[in-house]
Image (cartoon, coloured by chain):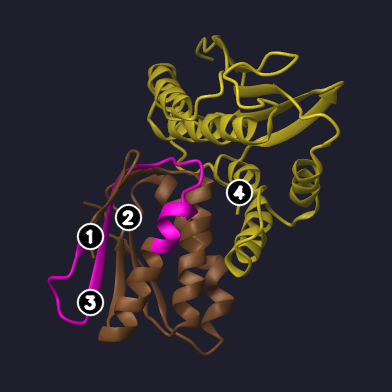
C-alpha cells in the first residue's frame, strides 16, 4: 500500500473568505497524494462544509478569534483514507441539537442518499429551515462516516473517508 | 435582467432566445448566505418568465463548486418555479463526479413534485466530451 501519511493542522479564524481558500488548498495538496482528482475534490468539499458549519455555529461573537477555546481544522492521512476533524467552541447554553439530530438521521436512514434527499425536500418546501444539509451532503456525496463529540464548551466533528479501490469511480453509497 | 456577480460566482443572463430565459453559472458559489442574493434574483426571473410565458434554463456545467447553502437556494427556486407554473430545465456535467452526485440527489428529491400539477422540471446531463 502506498504511503499516504500526512497531517494538515491549522487554526481557523472567523473570516468567511478563508473557507474557499482552505477548500482549494486542501484540494491541491490531496491531488498530489491521491491518484485522480475526484477523491481530493470530495475531501475538499467536506472541509468546506465542516469549516462553514464551524464559522456559522461556533462562538465567535463578531471577532476573528473564537471565544474561550481555539478553533482548529486537522486533516490526516489514515491507512485507508483521510480523516477531517474540525473543532470549535460552542456558544454558551446552545447545545448542537440540529447537528446530533442529523447524525441520528444518517444512522436511521436506509442510505446516506435517502437522508440527504429527505432533507432537500424539507428545505425545498420551507425556506426557514436552517442547518443540517451540509452534514447530510458529506455523508452522501463523500461517503463519509461522521461523528461528533462535545467536551465542555467545545465540539469536534470528524468525517472519515476511505479511498475507493483503484479504478473505482464512485464515492457515494446509493 | 442583469448578470449577477456575487463573491466568486457569476450568473450570466441569456435572453437571446424568445420564450427562454437562460442562466449560465460560472465560478464558485460559496457565499455564507446565498439566499439573500439569489432569492431576489430568482424572484425577478420568475416574474419575467410569467410575464413573457418563458421557461427557465439553468446551465451548471462550468460551475466549479457550490456549497450546501447554495443548493438550498437552488431547490427553493425550483419549488417556487413549480408552484408558479414555470418550466425549468437544468443542465449539468455528469462527467464531473461532484455534479453527478449533487444533481442525482436533486433530481430524486424533486421527483414527488412531478406528480403534483405545476410546471415540468427536467435535468439534462451533458454527455461525456
Is residue A65 inside the magenta stretch? no
Colour-to-chain, brown: B
Q: Is residue A20 left or right of residue A53?
A: left
Q: CA distance from mark 2 to mark 3?
A: 16 Å
Mark on residue B2? 1
On whether disc 4 and disc 1 are found on a single subunit, the reply is: no
Q: Chain of mark 3?
A: B
* Pair 2/3: label in front: 3
Q: What shade does chain A have?
A: yellow
- Name the residue beneath numbered marker 4: A173
Which numbered disc, 1 or 2, marks the residue that appears first in the sequence?
1
Question: Callout 3: few (<14), some (14-19), or many (20+) C-alpha neighbours within 10 Å?
Answer: some
Task: Give the quadrant of residue A1.
Answer: top right
Q: Residue at 44% of width from left, 76% of height from top?
A: B81
Marks counted in the figure total 4
Q: In the rendered structure, the residue with mark 1 lies on which chain?
A: B
Please tell me which residue is depicted at 65% across the width and 52% down the height of the picture. Answer: A130
Percent across and percent down for residue A125 are 61, 70
Q: Residue at x 60, y 44 (%)?
A: A134
Taking the spot 60% from the left edge, 30% from the top edge, the residue there is A55
Badge 3 marks a residue whose secondary structure is strand
Chain at tag 4: A
Name, please, the residue furthest toward the bottom. Answer: B117
Single out the mark in the foreground, 1 or 2.
1
Q: Which residues are magenta?
A: B13-40
Q: Nearer the viewer, mark 3 or mark 4?
A: 3
Identify the residue under disc 2.
B60
Tell me if residue B24 is in the magenta stretch. yes
Amino acid at each position: 500500500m502506498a504511503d499516504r501519511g500526512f497531517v494538515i493542522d491549522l487554526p481557523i479564524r472567523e473570516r468567511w473568505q478563508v473557507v474557499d481558500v482552505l477548500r482549494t488548498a486542501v484540494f491541491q495538496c490531496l491531488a498530489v497524494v491521491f491518484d485522480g482528482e475526484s477523491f481530493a475534490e470530495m475531501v475538499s468539499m467536506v472541509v468546506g462544509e465542516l469549516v462553514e458549519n464551524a464559522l456559522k455555529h461556533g462562538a465567535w461573537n463578531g471577532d476573528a478569534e473564537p471565544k474561550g477555546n481555539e478553533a482548529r481544522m486537522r486533516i490526516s492521512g489514515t491507512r485507508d483514507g483521510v480523516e477531517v476533524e474540525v473543532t470549535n467552541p460552542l456558544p454558551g447554553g446552545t447545545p448542537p441539537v440540529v447537528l446530533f439530530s442529523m447524525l441520528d438521521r444518517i444512522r436511521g436512514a436506509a442510505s446516506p442518499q435517502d437522508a440527504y434527499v429527505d432533507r432537500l425536500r424539507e428545505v425545498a418546501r420551507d425556506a426557514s429551515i436552517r442547518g443540517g444539509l451540509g452534514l447530510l451532503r458529506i455523508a452522501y456525496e463523500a461517503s463519509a462516516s461522521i461523528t461528533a463529540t462535545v467536551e465542555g464548551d467545545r465540539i469536534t466533528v470528524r468525517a472519515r473517508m476511505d479511498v475507493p479501490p483503484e479504478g473505482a469511480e464512485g464515492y457515494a453509497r446509493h | 435582467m442583469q448578470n449577477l456577480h456575487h463573491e466568486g460566482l457569476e450568473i450570466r443572463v441569456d435572453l437571446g432566445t424568445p420564450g427562454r430565459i437562460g442562466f449560465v453559472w460560472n465560478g464558485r458559489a460559496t457565499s455564507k448566505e446565498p439566499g439573500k442574493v439569489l432569492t431576489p434574483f430568482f424572484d425577478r426571473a420568475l416574474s419575467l418568465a410569467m410575464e413573457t410565458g418563458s421557461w427557465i434554463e439553468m446551465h451548471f456545467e462550468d460551475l466549479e463548486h457550490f456549497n450546501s447553502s447554495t443548493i438550498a437556494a437552488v431547490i427553493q427556486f425550483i419549488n417556487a418555479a413549480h408552484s408558479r407554473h414555470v418550466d425549468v430545465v437544468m443542465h449539468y456535467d455528469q462527467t464531473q463526479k461532484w455534479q453527478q452526485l449533487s444533481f442525482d440527489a436533486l433530481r430524486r428529491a424533486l421527483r414527488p413534485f412531478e406528480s403534483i400539477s405545476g410546471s415540468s422540471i427536467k435535468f439534462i446531463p451533458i454527455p461525456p466530451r
